[in-house]
Amino acid sequence: MTAAPARHRGLLAAAGGHHRFGLSATARIRAEAADGTTDLPLLHGDGPFVLRRMPSRGPQARVCLLNTMSAPHNGDRLRIEAAIGPDADLHVTSAAATVALPGPTLEPAVHEVALRVADSARLAWLPEPLISAAGSDLRQHIRIELASTARLVLSEQQILGRAHEPPGRLSSRLTVRRDGRTVLDQETTYGPGVPGWDGPAVLAGHRAVGQLLVVDPTDHEHPAEARLLTDVPSGAHAVLTPLAGPGTLLTALAPDAGDLQRCLDSALAHLF
Amino acid sequence: MSPLSLLILGDGRFPSGGHAHSGGAETAIAAGRVHDAATLRDFCQGRLHTTGLVAAALAAGAATGYDPLSLDEAADARTPSPALRRVARRLGRQLMRAVRVTWPGPELDDLAAARPGGAHQPVVLGVAARMAALTPYDAAQAAAYDSVCGPVTAAIRLLGLDPFQATAVTAGLCGDMEHVASQAAGHAARLPAEGVDALPATSAPLLEITAEQHATWPVRLFAS
């Protein structure tokens, strides 16, 4: 509805109307194949999200997501949608870590990501980490719809608490549907008030959790067995597991963000 | 329904093969993360509220009569670790053998025929509860109890923990188990309207990772 992205939190909150506190914003991306390259006919930033087109690499269009406000605060409702059309190739990163912050309301912040990848299309979704700051409460849901020949590389990194601070409450669900069937559905909830979250079955003191999901139906060389990564920093654990459907998932736990990044780098080296 | 059927289904002496599995406790103990009754309690609580909740919801869903094959597929999607998928199916197959004799019924026969290698254990548990005329909440309680009991029983052998103390750990988590069972039954009640997306997908990253570590051990006391 807004002609230009409004950058002022107060203005947005007032314009939203439905929520007394917090802002609502939806950013949208559409990628389409065109003559061996990928066009971006829709690149719509909103609220805190500014979408910046980066130089293409061959057939691949590249977009960088910039968070130009401090968001999300508790009570915010943010959404990002991306649709990758047949044969298109899109690479999305973000410019900096996202920090979930407390807000003027007890309502949690909601962050939804909806990604649709069509046949023969490819999406790399590799954002910087999400940091759950003390007092924040964020519910995140990433939903992915893949056509049967779609390819995906997606990473997710969660840092529980800023350095030397306790974490907020963070719940995150990742649902991947391929050809209409759910092939992966995982939810994690950490932070104050969540029973057992930091105990010996769940995190055991680790403060950085990451996932890397690769779905590539054209690659038949991925092993059917799980693989424990050994070239990871001490105190970190990482395992590559083949899903019940096509796809490989890295699950990594590390003491901090730097070690987690090294686990993801190691997994990428194994996979590509 | 008879509460005695629930006691039979939940009894550690029920011949379901569960005694050979530690539910991740063997790796946690070897790594020193579980070393006494207090850390065992923390371990069981974390497991109960994550994979235990999923198991309880699958069991409750199967006990409502919802399509067990859809639930079995939903269990796969919620279990990224192939070692844990293998264990869940092996336990499901063993439980199936016992319950088909104990509470025979066509729904168990159909599931056994459709999944000869074993369906996920909580799904079999739920169908068995249905055959025993138990409620979805009963099935969820049995699954929640199973999620705690496995590690506790294993810890008695692995840590030499006093069995009285170990049982106190289980009893101390009764409130948590009831809460999880009631959440699970709530999820299961939404299955007809929402399909398997209504089920929780709560996971424990460390259990996923250590299950794969455990599977590579050349010598181990428990199968998982």
Image (cartoon, coloured by chain):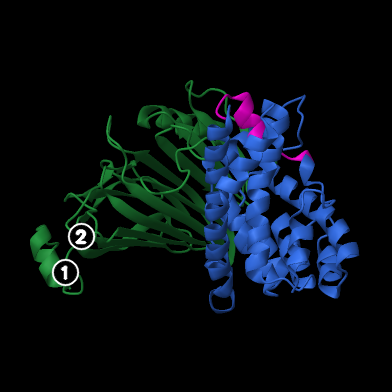
Q: Who is closer to the viewer here, A241 or B85?
A: B85
Q: Amino acid at mark 2?
A: Thr
> Which class describes the residues within 10 Å of circle 1: few (<14), some (14-19), or many (20+)?
few
Q: Secondary structure at mark 1?
A: loop
Instruction: Give, as a single range, the part of the protein colored magenta.
Output: B20-34
Label 2 and label 1 in one chain: yes
Marks 2/1 in contact by CB < 8 Å: the verdict is yes
Residue pictured at 52% horizontal, 44% vertical: B46
Q: Is residue A138 magenta?
A: no
Residue pictured at 53% horizontal, 53% vertical: B176
Indicate the colour of chain A. Answer: green
x and y percentages locating residue B64 in the rendered image = 67, 74
Residue pictured at 71% horizontal, 62% vertical: B123
Q: Please, which residue is most extreme toward the bottom here?
A: B193
Q: Does residue B10 sit above or below A3 in this rendering? A: above
Q: Who is closer to the viewer here, B147 or A117?
A: B147
* Chain letter for mark 2: A
> What residue sits right under mark 2 in the picture?
A105
Residue pictured at 86% horizontal, 73% vertical: B105
Depth check, mark 2 against mark 1: the one in front is 2
Tell me, by letter, which chain the rendering colours blue: B
Q: Does residue B153 sit above or below B158 in this rendering? A: below
* Chain letter for mark 1: A
Q: Please, which residue is most extreme toward the top here?
A: A234
> What residue sits right under mark 1 in the picture?
A20
Q: Who is closer to the viewer here, B63 or A161?
A: B63
> Which class describes the residues within 10 Å of circle 2: few (<14), some (14-19), or many (20+)?
some
Q: Which mark is residue A186?
A: none
